Amino acid sequence: MYRPGRTASWSAGLTVLLVVVALGSAALGPVRIDPVTVAMAALNAIAVPTGVSTGTTTVPGLGFSTTVPTLEFTGVFDFEVTGSHQLIVETIRLPRIALAATVGFSLAAAGTVMQGFFRNPLADPSIIGVSSGAAAGAVAAIAFPVLAPFASIHLSAFVGALGTAFLVYGIATEGGRTPVATLLLAGVAVQAFLGALISYMLVHSGDDLRRAVVWMMGHLSNTTWGDVRFALPVALLGVFVLGAYARELNVLLLGEEDAHHLGVDVERTKLLLLALSSVITAAGVAVAGVIGFVGLVVPHIMRLIVGPDHRILLPTSALAGASFLVATDTIARIGPAEVPVGIVTAFVGAPFFLFLLVRREVHSL
């Protein structure tokens, strides 16, 4: 029987874990800062709008300036922290940690839904080509800007990811029905085609090859608060709506025919779950590149711990995914030379998943 208190307690515990991991991550780096100072600097960064002023801005493409209203912000806290430590925490480490948490949150939630949707523990957010579509859009924007309709790599990757997801859905849908097996096969075929396209673009990318390859490995370097503002609202809203459909996802595990008899609008629910999972995955991949194993391993581990009920599995997996990616990104950046975080998630995730296979802990849903 479902107990809301169990969901609340697990979520609270994983939120505390995320805060602890984030503070520990922000304390580590070339300049070591003690966690108490990190906490004070983080609190000093909190500001609320307290007024409105006016400023001028130049209209893009037209060249003239105009007056626009701007919000005035005032800090909530004023702890004594040295200027250098405040700058390091607020402008360098916190944005990266916040983005890592956001992307891990999104990928783990999307992986949970995909594993339930396909009733397969090997499913992950990229199974219908979202990551391949994002990579194609990003590589095109990096190596061949003339081919990309958007100047922003983030936006090109986001549009490429969503376009691929809905292309796969359109190919698999016939007569108002979308068989899961056909959807999976369409995703595999489209991924193979996009893989060939990406390889072709990389071969002819010239001096932009390294930049494109690093993006495809997954990275969180040079993160700004703008990246967080791009991905965070999508992640929070998307996971919130997915959580409202956790019961329907539970019923779909029984099979589509049984779900229909139990009052679930199967095709509408499948479209909504697929669309929302694709959107939150696209937002995460667009700002961080292709990061594997978060959406595969984390939901499976949490399913072994809390059980298969998506009303508790979805929020706990999302929070655990946030902590996992913050921790792995910390490992990626504190070594002698920074490496793309996607490499670290693969090094950590793949052996652990093999361990589960050897222990026969990986099973069908």
Image (cartoon, rainbow, N blue to C red):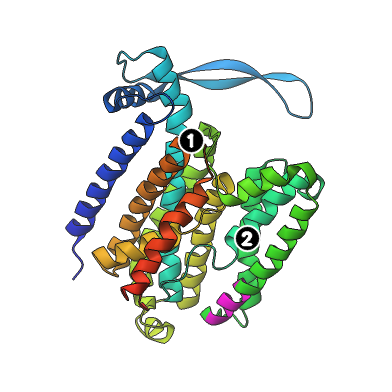
Left or right of residue 143: residue 114: left
- Which residue lies under the disc numbered 2? 132
Q: Kindly give the residue lying farthest to the front in the view shown.
A: 336
Q: Quadrant of residue 25?
A: top left
Name the magenta segment's main secondary structure: helix
Q: Residues within 10 Å of mark 1 (few under 14, many from 20)?
A: few
User: Which residue is label 1 attached to?
Assistant: 336
The quarter of the picture where residue 63 lies is top right
In this picture, residue 130 sits left or right of residue 50: right
x 49%, y 60%: residue: 277
Q: Residues within 10 Å of mark 2 (few under 14, many from 20)?
A: many
- For the N terminus, which image quadrant? bottom left
Between marks 1 and 2 in the image, the one whose residue lies nearer the viewer = 1
Q: Is residue 182 magenta?
A: yes
Residue 134 - label: none
Magenta residues span 181-187
The quadrant holding residue 37 is top left
Q: Residue at x 40, y 19 (%)?
A: 86
Q: CA distance from mark 1 to mark 2?
A: 31 Å
Q: Earlier in the sequence, mark 1 or mark 2?
A: 2
